[in-house]
Image: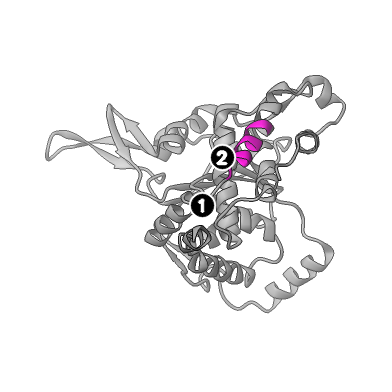
Amino acid sequence: MENNEQFASRIDLSQLKDSVAAIKSEIARVIVGQDKMIELLLTAILADGHVLLEGVPGVAKTLTAKLIAKIVDVDFSRIQFTPDLMPSDILGTSVFNVKTSEFEFKSGPIFANIVLIDEINRAPAKTQAALFEVMEERQVSIDGQRFAMNPPFITIATQNPIDQEGTYRLPEAQLDRFLFKISVGYPSLEEEILIIEGEHGRKEDPVASIKTILSGEEIADYRQKVAELHVERNLMKYIAEIVHETRQNKSLYLGASPRASLGILGASKALAAIRGRDFVVPEDIKEVTFPVLGHRLLLTPEKEMEGLGTAQVIDRIIDKIEVPR
């Protein structure tokens, strides 16, 4: 009887799984490879998290973000960050109305559902800081007034590797507001041949040919289902142990915050849902731990000079902690 009750209460994820499969198929018509990046982007959308895409110019970071925005039927905005960009250029400003003799708020491009911030590390710290409140609290405060963002609100930011000319390192407080940092690498030789062949025969704008699959209401419904996924208590303890270990690790100068723990929990539930399960398994947690923690950890100067990477440290932490059974 108990098993029947548990079975009856299972969450129906068939529609969500079908939508994800349709999105992947639609994007594959334009983007060759990058399957992991696309799956993590969809995971972030379902987990209500912001994404930072890092890679050299020309590896389809911006194109992928534009395709995601086209597939989801919501308002889209693109902001190109430059060294002379001011906070008011992003958030908006108060303008004096001569007819009413009052100031009126004119919203900036941040007021959209999916916001693509291109080359976020090209702008100085003052402009980057303008995103702190809106990314965390989904609102903007201007002249004593608060303006809430309409859900869903997601920022997808791209950045070039920080050692490239004209880039500014993002402050830790801002990096911590991104659920994922996804590194986008070069395609393989076979993939590059397919890219060239696809472009040679293309006769229309790839973004214009993409079909809309998801609505804002469906995203809200899917997010509700994701929130209801089952997570065993020992898996929650497993997440806490991983994050806690980053604060004890001698190779790290800065460990992860509780926001990272919540990020791993939310992302692992979203990934499980994408794969058609209404429960989280340890593999889900392991898979999202790297993109959740990678940008939140700082190596000690000594380990940095030795050439150690944060991915290696995370690997060691995961190997050290016993996987729940």
Q: Residue 229 carries which label?
A: 1
Residue found at the very far front of the displayed protein = 1
Give the image quarter of residue 317: top right
Q: Where does the image place residue 279, in percent across and percent down from the top left?
A: 57, 53
**Residue interval drawn in magenta:** 232-241
Tell me the SS state at disc 1.
loop
Horizontal and vertical percent position of residue 142: 32, 31
Amino acid on which the number 1 mark rests in the picture: Leu
| Three-letter code, disc 2 | Gly
Question: Horizontally, is 155 left or right of 108 in the view?
Answer: right
x and y percentages locating residue 47 in the rendered image? 51, 48
In the image, what residue occupies the spot 60% across and 78% down? 203
Instruction: State how far apart marks 2 and 1 are (Cα).
Output: 15 Å
Residue 221 image-quadrant placement:
bottom left
Is residue 240 magenta-colored?
Answer: yes
Front in this rendered view, residue 99 or 70: 70
Camera sees residue 160: no
Camera-side residue of 8 and 188? 8
Packing grade of label 1 (10 A; few <14, some 14-19, many >=20) is some
Find disc 2 in the rendering and name its residue: 263
Placement of 110 over or under 167, stated as above or below? below
Q: Which of marks 2 and 1 is nearer the N terminus?
A: 1
